[in-house]
Amino acid sequence: MCEANAYIIRDGEEELVMEAVDKIEPENNGLRLVNIFGDQKFMRAHIHALFLVNHKIFLKEQQ
């Protein structure tokens, strides 16, 4: 399986925001995350780092 979990970094801590993310699309002033179940979430954030072998996506909130 190729999906990854998305985390937001706040105050140096990782907070899980969505599991099994299949797609990330830029939209307006942020990102739309879509998981393998079709659930969607919009976040005013940018991609901080991708660790594909570990199936992790790290996001940071936009200021």
Image (cartoon, rainbow, N blue to C red):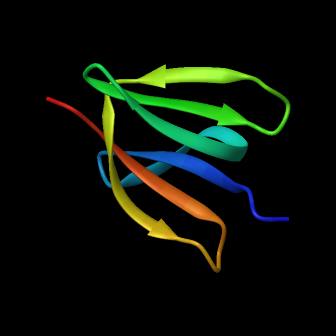
Image check: 52 left or right of 22? left
Q: Residue furthest left?
A: 63
| Front-lying residue, 55 or 16 | 55
Image height check: is 63 above or below 16? above
Position of residue 16 measured from the top left corner of the image (x, y, whole percent): 60, 43
Kindly identify the residue that appears in the image at 74 percent across and 23 percent down: 39
Position of residue 24 measured from the top left corner of the image (x, y, whole percent): 52, 41
Image height check: is 45 above or below 51? above
Which quadrant does the C terminus fall into? top left
Kindly identify the residue that appears in the image at 32 percent across and 55 percent down: 12
Kindly identify the residue that appears in the image at 85 percent across and 31 percent down: 37
| Front-lying residue, 35 or 17 | 35
Position of residue 27 measured from the top left corner of the image (x, y, whole percent): 37, 24
Position of residue 3 measured from the top left corner of the image (x, y, whole percent): 73, 56
Image check: 62 left or right of 52? left
Image check: 63 left or right of 42? left
Number of numbered labels in the structure image: 0
Which quadrant does the N terminus fall into? bottom right
Image height check: is 4 above or below 50? above
Kindly identify the residue that appears in the image at 73 percent across and 43 percent down: 19
